[in-house]
Image: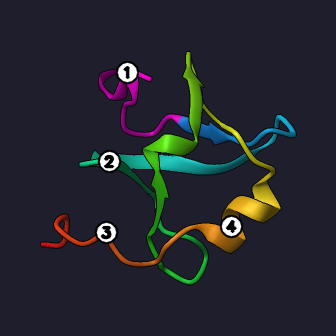
């Protein structure tokens, strides 16, 4: 997976082919997605990405991804 292909505002699509997030930016080995309705950023491991075209595709259903994503930047990537 080429992280350089992941750009700001790209849709993040889960394995059931539905968009569930939008890229804010790539931070190290994580993808920071835009704030949710509660104003919270979330982080997805880049390891979940299966391919990048006009969207970022991940390897799990959206519901599972939202249960497993992090609300804090991974250690070593915090500002």
Q: Earlier in the sequence, mark 1 or mark 4?
A: 1
Image vertical order of residue 1 relative to residue 33, above or below: above
Numbered circle sitting on residue 66: 4
Q: Earlier in the sequence, mark 2 or mark 4?
A: 2
The magenta stretch spans which residues?
A: 1-10
- Pick the residue in front: 49 or 38: 49
Residue at the limit of the structure toward the bottom, as seen here: 38
Name the residue beneath numbered marker 1: 2
Spatial CA span between label 1 and label 4: 23 Å
Q: Earlier in the sequence, mark 2 or mark 1?
A: 1
Q: Earlier in the sequence, mark 3 or mark 1?
A: 1
Mark 2: which secondary structure? loop
Numbered circle sitting on residue 29: 2
Spatial CA span between label 2 and label 1: 11 Å
Q: Residues within 10 Å of mark 1 (few under 14, many from 20)?
A: few
Toward which corner of the image does residue 49 lie, by quadrant?
A: top right
Q: Work out which quarter of the rendered image holds the N terminus and state it.
A: top left
Toward which corner of the image does residue 63 lie, by quadrant?
A: bottom right
- Pick the residue in front: 52 or 7: 52
Residue at the limit of the structure toward the right, as seen here: 16
Which secondary structure class fits the magenta region best? loop
Provide residue 67's location: percent of width, then percent of height: 70, 73
Name the residue beneath numbered marker 3: 74
């Amino acid at each position: 997976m080429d992280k350089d292909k992941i750009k700001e505002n790209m849709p993040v699509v889960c394995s059931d082919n539905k968009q569930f997030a939008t890229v804010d930016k790539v931070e190290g080995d994580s993808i920071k997605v835009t704030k949710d309705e509660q104003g919270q950023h979330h982080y997805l491991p880049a390891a979940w990405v299966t391919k990048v075209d006009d969207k970022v595709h991940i390897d799990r259903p959206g519901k599972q991804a939202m249960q497993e994503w992090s609300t804090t930047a991974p250690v070593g990537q915090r500002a």
